[in-house]
Amino acid sequence: MNEKTIVIFTALQIETKAVQRALAGIRRPVYVHTIGIRAVRVPTVLPKNIGAMIVAGLGGALDPGLKVGDVVVDDPHEMVPAEPSLRRGKICTVDAIIATPEEKSALFASTSALAVDMEQQHLQRLAERRRVALVGVRSISDTAAHAINPNLLQLVDAVGRPKPVALAAAIFEKPTLVLEMSKLAKDVKLATDRLGAAMRTIVQSLPM
Protein backbone atom coordinates (compact mmCIF):
# COMPACT_ATOMS: atom_id res chain seq x y z
CA MET A 1 0.00 0.00 0.00
CA ASN A 2 1.32 3.44 -0.93
CA GLU A 3 2.31 5.74 1.90
CA LYS A 4 -0.13 8.61 2.37
CA THR A 5 0.82 12.14 1.32
CA ILE A 6 1.25 14.94 3.83
CA VAL A 7 -0.22 18.12 2.34
CA ILE A 8 1.29 21.35 3.70
CA PHE A 9 -0.25 24.75 3.01
CA THR A 10 1.66 27.99 3.60
CA ALA A 11 0.46 31.53 2.99
CA LEU A 12 3.74 33.24 2.10
CA GLN A 13 6.57 32.35 -0.25
CA ILE A 14 9.09 32.88 2.55
CA GLU A 15 7.25 30.24 4.60
CA THR A 16 7.11 27.85 1.66
CA LYS A 17 10.86 28.15 1.08
CA ALA A 18 11.63 27.63 4.78
CA VAL A 19 9.52 24.47 4.88
CA GLN A 20 10.94 23.11 1.62
CA ARG A 21 14.52 23.69 2.80
CA ALA A 22 13.81 21.95 6.08
CA LEU A 23 12.17 18.94 4.43
CA ALA A 24 14.90 18.40 1.85
CA GLY A 25 16.01 14.78 1.91
CA ILE A 26 13.04 13.45 3.88
CA ARG A 27 11.75 10.26 2.29
CA ARG A 28 8.06 10.81 2.79
CA PRO A 29 5.53 11.94 0.18
CA VAL A 30 5.00 15.65 0.91
CA TYR A 31 3.08 18.23 -1.13
CA VAL A 32 3.77 21.89 -0.27
CA HIS A 33 1.59 24.63 -1.75
CA THR A 34 1.52 28.42 -1.24
CA ILE A 35 -2.10 29.48 -0.71
CA GLY A 36 -1.63 33.22 -0.11
CA ILE A 37 -2.73 35.48 2.72
CA ARG A 38 -6.25 34.54 3.90
CA ALA A 39 -5.98 31.32 1.83
CA VAL A 40 -6.99 33.00 -1.44
CA ARG A 41 -5.10 30.49 -3.62
CA VAL A 42 -6.16 27.08 -2.36
CA PRO A 43 -5.60 24.57 -5.21
CA THR A 44 -8.58 22.75 -6.69
CA VAL A 45 -6.56 19.62 -7.42
CA LEU A 46 -4.80 17.79 -4.58
CA PRO A 47 -3.19 14.37 -4.14
CA LYS A 48 -5.76 11.60 -3.72
CA ASN A 49 -4.16 9.63 -0.91
CA ILE A 50 -3.87 12.33 1.78
CA GLY A 51 -2.95 11.33 5.30
CA ALA A 52 -2.99 14.78 6.92
CA MET A 53 -3.19 18.45 6.07
CA ILE A 54 -0.97 21.00 7.79
CA VAL A 55 -1.39 24.78 7.68
CA ALA A 56 2.05 26.11 8.54
CA GLY A 57 3.58 29.56 8.79
CA LEU A 58 4.18 32.61 10.91
CA GLY A 59 1.70 33.80 13.49
CA GLY A 60 1.08 36.41 16.14
CA ALA A 61 1.16 35.52 19.83
CA LEU A 62 -1.92 36.04 21.98
CA ASP A 63 -0.52 34.24 25.01
CA PRO A 64 1.86 36.67 26.79
CA GLY A 65 4.17 33.76 27.62
CA LEU A 66 5.12 33.11 23.99
CA LYS A 67 8.38 34.47 22.56
CA VAL A 68 9.47 35.11 18.97
CA GLY A 69 10.37 31.74 17.46
CA ASP A 70 8.16 29.67 19.77
CA VAL A 71 6.07 27.18 17.78
CA VAL A 72 2.39 26.56 18.52
CA VAL A 73 0.64 23.41 17.27
CA ASP A 74 -3.15 23.24 17.03
CA ASP A 75 -3.74 19.49 16.80
CA PRO A 76 -7.23 18.52 18.03
CA HIS A 77 -6.95 14.99 16.56
CA GLU A 78 -3.57 14.45 18.27
CA MET A 79 -1.80 13.48 15.07
CA VAL A 80 1.56 14.91 16.17
CA PRO A 81 3.42 12.97 18.88
CA ALA A 82 4.43 14.86 22.03
CA GLU A 83 7.48 17.08 21.55
CA PRO A 84 8.84 19.37 24.32
CA SER A 85 9.77 22.14 21.87
CA LEU A 86 6.17 22.56 20.66
CA ARG A 87 3.41 24.40 22.50
CA ARG A 88 -0.01 22.76 22.18
CA GLY A 89 -3.10 24.90 21.95
CA LYS A 90 -5.70 26.64 19.85
CA ILE A 91 -4.85 28.92 16.92
CA CYS A 92 -7.48 31.55 16.10
CA THR A 93 -8.08 32.67 12.49
CA VAL A 94 -8.89 36.32 11.74
CA ASP A 95 -9.24 38.37 8.56
CA ALA A 96 -7.23 41.46 9.57
CA ILE A 97 -3.98 42.10 11.40
CA ILE A 98 -4.36 42.13 15.18
CA ALA A 99 -2.08 45.11 15.60
CA THR A 100 -1.95 46.27 19.22
CA PRO A 101 -1.22 44.58 22.55
CA GLU A 102 -4.72 45.61 23.66
CA GLU A 103 -6.34 43.86 20.68
CA LYS A 104 -4.26 40.76 21.27
CA SER A 105 -5.15 40.71 24.96
CA ALA A 106 -8.87 41.01 24.18
CA LEU A 107 -8.72 38.18 21.62
CA PHE A 108 -6.78 35.99 24.05
CA ALA A 109 -9.43 36.58 26.72
CA SER A 110 -12.34 35.85 24.38
CA THR A 111 -10.93 32.79 22.58
CA SER A 112 -8.23 31.28 24.86
CA ALA A 113 -6.20 30.80 21.66
CA LEU A 114 -2.43 30.88 22.04
CA ALA A 115 -1.78 32.41 18.62
CA VAL A 116 -3.51 34.05 15.69
CA ASP A 117 -3.30 33.48 11.93
CA MET A 118 -5.27 34.33 8.79
CA GLU A 119 -5.58 30.95 7.05
CA GLN A 120 -6.23 27.88 9.19
CA GLN A 121 -10.00 28.10 9.55
CA HIS A 122 -10.37 28.63 5.80
CA LEU A 123 -8.93 25.12 5.26
CA GLN A 124 -11.17 23.37 7.77
CA ARG A 125 -13.99 22.59 5.32
CA LEU A 126 -11.53 21.22 2.76
CA ALA A 127 -10.04 18.90 5.38
CA GLU A 128 -13.50 17.75 6.40
CA ARG A 129 -14.46 17.04 2.79
CA ARG A 130 -11.32 14.96 2.34
CA ARG A 131 -11.89 13.32 5.74
CA VAL A 132 -8.40 14.07 7.00
CA ALA A 133 -7.08 15.79 10.11
CA LEU A 134 -6.05 19.44 9.87
CA VAL A 135 -3.06 20.51 11.95
CA GLY A 136 -2.12 24.15 12.49
CA VAL A 137 1.54 25.06 13.01
CA ARG A 138 2.54 28.67 13.74
CA SER A 139 5.96 30.05 14.57
CA ILE A 140 5.61 33.30 16.50
CA SER A 141 6.88 36.38 14.64
CA ASP A 142 5.35 39.03 16.94
CA THR A 143 4.66 38.68 20.66
CA ALA A 144 1.53 39.63 22.56
CA ALA A 145 3.28 42.79 23.78
CA HIS A 146 4.48 43.84 20.32
CA ALA A 147 2.51 46.40 18.30
CA ILE A 148 2.74 45.96 14.52
CA ASN A 149 1.79 48.28 11.68
CA PRO A 150 -1.78 47.39 10.58
CA ASN A 151 -0.99 48.64 7.05
CA LEU A 152 1.76 46.08 6.39
CA LEU A 153 -0.51 43.92 4.22
CA GLN A 154 -0.92 46.83 1.80
CA LEU A 155 2.82 46.73 1.12
CA VAL A 156 2.95 43.10 -0.06
CA ASP A 157 1.08 40.97 -2.58
CA ALA A 158 -1.03 37.88 -1.83
CA VAL A 159 2.01 35.68 -1.14
CA GLY A 160 4.03 38.25 0.81
CA ARG A 161 6.26 39.69 -1.91
CA PRO A 162 6.97 43.43 -1.44
CA LYS A 163 5.20 45.94 -3.68
CA PRO A 164 8.08 48.33 -4.54
CA VAL A 165 5.98 51.39 -5.36
CA ALA A 166 3.71 51.05 -2.34
CA LEU A 167 6.70 50.37 -0.09
CA ALA A 168 8.63 53.42 -1.35
CA ALA A 169 5.58 55.64 -0.86
CA ALA A 170 5.02 54.35 2.67
CA ILE A 171 8.65 54.96 3.64
CA PHE A 172 8.52 58.46 2.12
CA GLU A 173 5.46 59.23 4.22
CA LYS A 174 6.84 57.58 7.36
CA PRO A 175 10.67 57.22 7.36
CA THR A 176 10.64 55.39 10.72
CA LEU A 177 8.95 52.52 8.90
CA VAL A 178 12.46 51.42 7.87
CA LEU A 179 13.33 50.73 11.52
CA GLU A 180 10.05 48.87 12.06
CA MET A 181 10.67 46.69 9.03
CA SER A 182 14.26 46.02 10.04
CA LYS A 183 13.15 44.64 13.43
CA LEU A 184 10.35 42.68 11.77
CA ALA A 185 12.81 41.15 9.30
CA LYS A 186 15.00 39.88 12.17
CA ASP A 187 12.02 38.39 13.97
CA VAL A 188 10.74 36.80 10.75
CA LYS A 189 14.16 35.24 10.09
CA LEU A 190 14.20 33.63 13.53
CA ALA A 191 10.57 32.55 13.24
CA THR A 192 10.98 30.98 9.79
CA ASP A 193 14.11 29.10 10.91
CA ARG A 194 12.20 27.69 13.88
CA LEU A 195 9.21 26.91 11.64
CA GLY A 196 11.40 24.84 9.34
CA ALA A 197 12.92 22.90 12.22
CA ALA A 198 9.50 22.22 13.71
CA MET A 199 8.06 21.07 10.40
CA ARG A 200 10.90 18.62 9.86
CA THR A 201 10.25 17.14 13.30
CA ILE A 202 6.50 16.98 12.74
CA VAL A 203 6.63 15.46 9.26
CA GLN A 204 9.11 12.80 10.37
CA SER A 205 6.99 11.89 13.37
CA LEU A 206 3.50 11.69 11.84
CA PRO A 207 2.22 8.10 12.23
CA MET A 208 1.14 7.32 8.69
Image (cartoon, grey):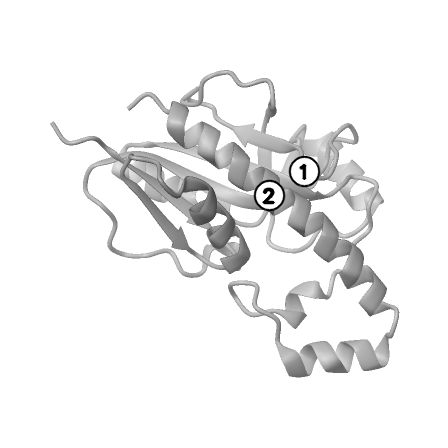
Q: Residue at x 71, y 38 (%)?
A: 61
Residue 142: image quadrant is: top right
Measured in 3D between alpha carbons, the distance from the residue under mark 2 to the one under mark 1, in whole angstroms, is 8 Å
Q: Residue at x 54, y 19 (%)?
A: 83
Q: Which residue is mark 1?
A: 69
Q: Which mark is residue 193?
A: 2
Q: Is residue 165 above or below residue 154?
A: below
* 106 or 77: nearer the viewer: 77
Q: Which residue type does callout 1 highlight?
A: Gly
Residue sitting at the far front = 25
Going by the numbered disc 2, the residue's amino acid type is: Asp
Q: Secondary structure at mark 1?
A: loop
Q: Closest to the observer: 150 or 70?
A: 70
Q: Residue at x 45, y 17 (%)?
A: 81
The C terminus sits in image quarter: top left
**Is residue 201 visible in this depiction of the protein?**
yes
Q: Earlier in the sequence, mark 2 or mark 1?
A: 1
Q: Are marks 2 and 1 in contact (CB under 8 Å)?
A: yes
